[in-house]
Image (cartoon, rainbow, N blue to C red):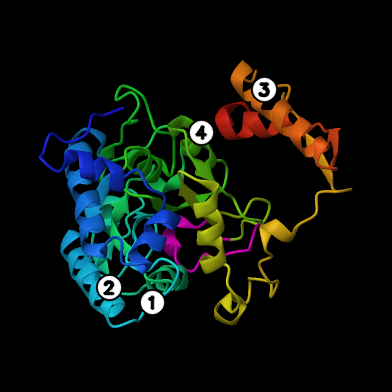
């Protein structure tokens, strides 16, 4: 891991930047921490690690500092904006944030945009403070597992700078794993959040297709008419608790009024879901690529835990996986 900054406040910063978004929110709400000290600690961490990572490609530090000051003033007055009041976060570069570019790695889209998407607005309304935007694979496609493009260059893995953090949400994964952000919003179509989370040792969640709106994503990043695999915005963090918190905000009622493609289905409380009798399919080999032993072991252990809690876990084989992998990885062989 990249070492912490050697500044006098490094020990305190290391403590703050290791906390989850949920814990930071609790401490800020209780007055045990100020949003300003939390935001400053994360900015210092970004400044220390980002020159070697190249994960944050659009910084919003001045705006973040102003928002943190306002958050502390509101808390002193007895007002909390929401469950992420005063908590710093980061966003994948593909998302529309006022005053920033959303290039998805295309040189032709380097101008700043003025609109913001509904998910970004929901995070702001919940009290989150945006520190910056993170690097992506060009056009959000990462067939080689890398995270680089002609606009911002390459992002490196914080555990080993010679390796990739995965793509296309590699910038998000890298900066969260390095302690520069406790929570981020990425995106996934064919592994774009799952692969970086795996490469960087994080937690992520790919929601069911259309659970969240894609109105936040730059329109030129979308493939018109694609129905078989629909990209989704995805939270990524260092704890499952933070994923639950993020989804409760992102998937709160009302998205279907903004985007008719989103079904009016309430987001359930995960703790209220009964596993007893639930049928789950599992596999650890798709017949094309051999899985790493550690990954196979993790899948099998998860299946055992689910069975112990009453779920019916059955072996399942994905159909046409060989054809799909050939079309995706070696299109010239189609």
Q: Nearer the viewer, residue 304 or 253?
A: 304
Q: Which residue is mark 2?
A: 71
Q: Residue at x 56, y 65 (%)?
A: 248
Where residue 99 sits, quadrant-wise, is bottom left
What span is in magenta? 209-224
Residue 193 magenta = no
Question: Which residue position holds label 4?
Answer: 198
Q: Quadrant of residue 73?
A: bottom left
Q: Position of residue 91 (x, y in %)?
A: 37, 56
Q: Is residue 246 above or below residue 118?
A: above
Q: Is residue 109 visible?
A: yes
Q: Is residue 160 left or right of residue 220?
A: left
In three-dimensional space, the C-alpha distance between marks 2 and 3, rounded to whole angstroms, equals: 45 Å
Which numbered circle lies on residue 211? Answer: none
Using the numbered discs, state the Cα–Cα distance from disc 1 to disc 2 in whole angstroms: 8 Å
* Closer to us: 261 or 74: 74
First-in-chain label (4 vs 2): 2
């Amino acid at each position: 891991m990249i070492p912490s900054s050697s500044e006098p406040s490094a020990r305190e910063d290391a403590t703050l930047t290791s906390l989850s978004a949920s814990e930071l929110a609790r401490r800020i709400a209780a007055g045990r921490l100020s949003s300003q000290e939390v935001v400053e600690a994360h900015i210092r961490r970004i400044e220390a690690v980002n020159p070697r990572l190249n994960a944050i490609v659009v910084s919003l530090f001045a705006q973040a500092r102003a928002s943190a000051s306002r958050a502390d003033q509101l808390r002193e007055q007895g007002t909390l904006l929401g469950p992420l009041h005063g908590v710093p976060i980061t966003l994948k570069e593909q998302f529309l944030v006022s005053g920033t570019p959303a290039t998805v790695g295309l040189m032709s889209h380097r101008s700043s945009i003025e609109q913001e998407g509904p998910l970004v607005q929901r995070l702001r309304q919940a009290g989150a403070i945006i520190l910056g935007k993170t690097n992506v694979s060009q056009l959000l496609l990462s067939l080689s597992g890398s995270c680089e493009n002609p606009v911002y260059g390459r992002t490196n893995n914080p555990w080993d700078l010679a390796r990739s953090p995965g793509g296309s949400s590699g910038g998000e994964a890298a900066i969260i794993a390095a302690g520069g952000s406790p929570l981020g919003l990425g995106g996934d179509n064919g592994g774009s959040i799952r692969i970086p989370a795996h490469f960087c040792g994080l937690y992520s969640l790919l929601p069911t297709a259309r659970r969240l709106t894609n109105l936040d994503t730059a329109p030129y990043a979308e493939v018109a008419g694609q129905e078989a695999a629909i990209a989704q915005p995805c939270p990524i963090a260092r704890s499952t608790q933070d994923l639950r918190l993020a989804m409760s905000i992102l998937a709160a009622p009302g998205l279907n009024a903004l985007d008719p493609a989103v079904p009016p289905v309430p987001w359930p409380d995960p703790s209220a879901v009964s596993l007893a009798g639930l049928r789950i399919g599992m596999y650890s080999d798709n017949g094309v690529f051999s899985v790493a032993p550690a990954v196979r072991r993790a899948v099998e252990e998860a299946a055992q835990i689910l069975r112990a809690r009453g779920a019916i876990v059955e072996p399942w084989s994905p159909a046409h996986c060989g054809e799909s992998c050939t079309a995706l990885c070696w299109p010239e062989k189609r």
